[in-house]
Image (spheres, rainbow, N blue to C red):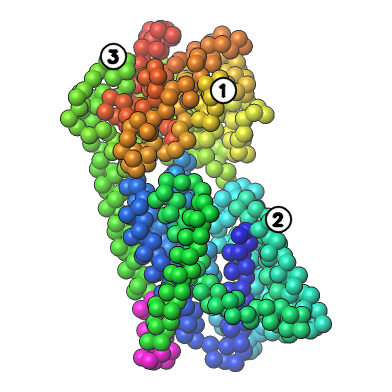
Amino acid sequence: MSGGVDVFLVISAYLLTGSIDRALSGGGFSLTARYARTFSRLLPAALLVLVVTAVASLIILPRSAWLELLRQVAATALLVQNMELAGAGLAYGAAGSGASPLQHYWSLSVQGQFLLLWPLLALAVAGLRSLARRPWSTRAFGIVTGALIVASFGYAVFLAGIDQSVAYYSFPARFWELGAGAALALLLARHRAHPRWGGPLAWAGVALILSSGFVVDGGDTFPGPWALWPVLGTLALLAGSESGGAEDAGLTRILRLRPITWLADVAYPLYLWHWPILVLYLQWRGQDQVGVLGAAAILVASVALSWLTQRRFVDPIARAAERVGAPARPGRVVAALVGASLVVAGVAGGGAVLEQQRSDAALAVDTDPEQHPGALELTVGAHGPWIARPAPAAEFAQADTPDIYHAGCVQDWRDAPGSGEVLVCLDAPGTRTVVLSGGSHAVQFYPALRAVADAQGWQLLVVDKDGCRLAAPDPELERRDSCAQWNEGALDTILGLDPDVVVTVGTETRSESGAEGAEHVYDGQVEVWRRLSDAGVPVVALRDTPRFPFFVPDCLLETGDETACGRPRDEVYAARFPLLDRVDLPARVVPIDLSDAICAPERCAPVVGNVLVYRDQSHLTATYAATLAEALAQALSSSLPELWTRR
């Protein structure tokens, strides 16, 4: 439900702040005891579910998902899963075909960061007042809290306007919600709502909370102003309940009903269990949606595991801690919790390092052209049998990207400060200057173009922003603000390089379309080509690669069936290269179609010439792209023979 996490954050901050305020007011605050009490309630269940989910995921998920899974396990154990998810979201084309079974732990990380930092801030305020020979002041702490809320809310609005997906996981952007709960706790320490208004206030809060999921799409709008809907609802519910008026209004009687109190007892483990069970069920079944029977099974399993976790794991740990006198020895409790978290993080982190090393080693091995001819199977009829396994291995294919990405000069796809700046990947001077530009679907051809440039002694420059086509404004072409900003300076930058030719992607394939609409040519791109052509610069417009409705490597790992993981050619390509029928193409635009070196006449297969063609659902592996060099050289030499004439 949209807003559920926000309610959770507000309440947790409300309870913590009230406890801290009372302890400091009475002079009996212990930071170690606070940490022991707080995290002993959260971490045992969280670590249990984390470990079980990790083991189940390693069994169910394809090998290609292991590296990111292990990274997330380590991040979750260290309470930084929100940062890991935000970072993974910044990698264009990263993630995978499905949601992470650990994605929901981001909110626990945000809460954990607050639970760690908030007592420290309270101690800092108390320390400053002590230096001034003044006692603890709830009002002073409230002023500090209010200032932080304002700053956080402003930052949330700012960051959501730049990159909402990053703002969603950001602790600084989320703090204002936690701060709201904290501020209410400090306010209610001095002032309470009149009981007469408590009942209506509490019921209004319930209405806001329950309606939040129907009114607001939190995934697209939180933690911006729309998050006020569930936050204000939670504040109203808490304020009304604390007034005593909720009892007279009947709300308290409802909340005391046995089914509701039972559910409240297992709510935390239920939150931990429900998401991985759902995600892994869908992955196991190979489905995108769950049916009625599946939903019932997931619900029963989630509730049962939640009850078992609380009654057979969390409660026994708490009783054992009481018997050994843990409340009097909070340092030991904290040490045990930190140790357990570090063990989980260490094992997962070590596994991630090993998996990364295995991936790097596999991709670093040069392929044998005789065993891995790739596109040459289609262009010159190079046939097997192949003794070696297909390369790259499907589990590592997603990392098989053009090495130009490692140079740090390809602009990131996201909207962020500086992401609209035009960068240039430089190269040694050559007989000709070739510029490659037009987004990741242009840069995917870099290995082939690099081989041609090296063979001919050309200078190959890359001017690119991922997820951003080289194009003028076009109502049909959706693009981020930073892409529009990048395009404002890209053309001038390219012209300033005095190129002999600009190579870009000329069409866009669409996997959801049939043969008649499977490819599109954007007017905005044609307009930029016209400006380049008017400046005397030839433009090579490459045909786009197919787009599949699934991640091809994952399909191969899950099914092992190359036929099932391919697609009929007429589903992913138009019957004829659309640029050949475009009557308004500028004179110096050269359409080049390499589709026959990627797909057979009837079908686009996932493996060609013993080389895995795709690293995800639409991008070529760098290994396969390199095998296109001969086909690209032939097309360029026949279309632009002047490039082969030395100046």
Quarter the C terminus occupies:
top left
- Residue at 53% x, 63% y is 107
Q: CA distance from mark 1 to mark 2?
A: 35 Å
Q: Residues within 10 Å of mark 2 (few under 14, many from 20)?
A: few
Q: Which residues are magenta?
A: 321-337
Question: Which of disc 3 and disc 2 is earlier in sequence?
Answer: 2
Total marks shown come to: 3
Is residue 484 visible in the rendered structure shown here? yes
For disc 2, the marked residue is 215
For disc 1, the marked residue is 517
- Residue at 63% x, 55% y is 218
Q: Quadrant of residue 582?
A: top right
Q: CA distance from mark 3 to mark 1?
A: 30 Å
Q: Quadrant of residue 433?
A: top left
- Mark whose residue sits in front, 2 or 3: 2
For badge 1, the amino acid type reads Gly
Q: Residues within 10 Å of mark 1 (few under 14, many from 20)?
A: some
On the image, the x and y values in percent for residue 41 come to 47, 78
- Residue 526, placed above or below residue 323: above
Residue nearest the viewer, comparing 82 with 581: 581
Q: Residue furthest front?
A: 293
- Residue at 27% x, 48% y is 357
On the image, the x and y values in percent for residue 593 come to 44, 16
For badge 2, the amino acid type reads Val
Quarter the N terminus occupies:
bottom right
Q: CA distance from mark 2 to mark 3?
A: 59 Å
Q: Are marks 3 and 1 in contact (CB under 8 Å)?
A: no
